[in-house]
Amino acid sequence: MPGHDVAENGSPLPEPAVRVPTRVVAYREAEPRADSRALAVETPVNLVYGSVPYAVMMTTPSDLEDFAYGFSLTEGIIEAAEEIRGVTLESGAEGLRLLVDLAPGRLREHLARKRALSGRTGCGVCGIEDLASLPSADMREAPAIRVTVAAIERALSALSDAQVLNHETRAVHAAAWADLDGTLVAVREDVGRHNALDKLVGALMRSGRDPATGFAVITSRCSFEMVEKAARLGAAVIVAISAPTSLALARAREHDMTLCAIARSDTLTVFCGGERLVMSG
């Protein structure tokens, strides 16, 4: 099960999954049969900086400190993990609050910005005011890494077993980080695909892992926000189970990233950046 957080005020937190009674109806049987089903928990989480509420995101209540770090980076609120002095998790009747304590200079810069974001599940751009506000990661020099196709195959093969919450609920996305040999070193899950990636970004930031030491794998479609978040982390290679959008491909090219998608057990489609891939080894 994903990491379960504890509220600072001692209030109990929701579990990542709950089991509910159901009835299964077979079309050609007279009576339904009693059963039960695990459901992924979806709860509002308010991110607060310097006592000022910033965003409400619908998330799975696990690995929330990772989420605070990753969301803060991919939103452009911080540039490095050291700019967060601490994260406090509070639980209340209406949902959860993540109180993010920013370093003084970073807090002043943040308070000078504004953004209204009442989040839907995993939504990456809800609340922006105009097209010029679409997220765009800073241009950077992509790490000069090489990834073997065998390593990608190894990571994809291991990812299914690593999705603990999805095995129980069949309702959440995953984002994973693999070493260059394909070994999974971190996996995060959430009802929101953007949230899962933010949690992964936060976990990597907090552990101090160098983005040049591996690649990202996501189980969702690859929209432009997913590419932007990976670019903010500094990832050079992103592998998606589903297909990319046209804007995702354009952004991946702009950031000199390698984008592989429609990743299956036997095939992989390379959309850009194929020079980083090694066909054997």
Image (cartoon, rainbow, N blue to C red):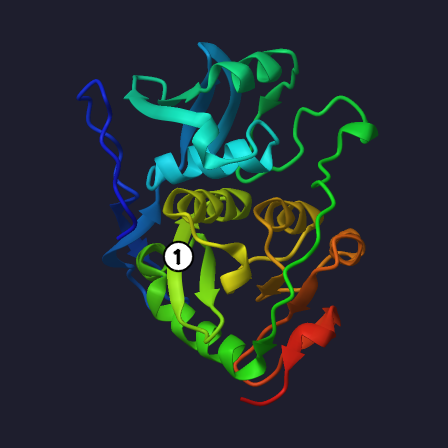
Residue 126 at x, y percent in the picture: 65, 30
Query: Where residue 19 sits: x, y (%)?
Result: 24, 47
Frontmost residue, 16 versus 142 = 142
**Residue 40 x, y percent position in the rendering:** 36, 46
Q: Nearer the viewer, residue 42 or 225?
A: 225
Residue drawn at 53 percent across, 22 percent down: 55
- Residue depicted at x 34% and y 64%: 162
Outermost residue toward the bottom in this view: 280
**216 or 209: which is nearer to us?**
209
Q: 202 or 60, which lies in front?
A: 202
Give the residue furthest to the left: 10
Give the percent coordinates (x, y) of residue 179: 45, 67
Quarter of the view holding residue 276: bottom right
Residue 257 sits in which quadrant? bottom right
In the displayed structure, would residue 174 be above or below residue 205?
below
At 57% from the left edge and 80% from the top edge, which residue is drawn?
148
Kind of residue at badge 1: Val
One can see residue 180 in this view: yes
Using residue 36 as the reference point, say whether residue 83 is left or right of it.
Answer: right
* Above or below: residue 277 compared with residue 164: below
Q: Is residue 226 above or below residue 119?
A: below
Q: Secondary structure at mark 1?
A: strand
Total labels: the figure holds 1
Residue with the mark numbered 1 = 187
In-image side of 275 versus 178 (left or right): right
Residue under the point 49% across and 14% down: 104
Q: Is residue 218 visible?
A: no
Mark 1 Cα within 10 Å, few/some/many (few <14, many 20+)? many
Q: Is residue 52 left or right of residue 132?
A: left
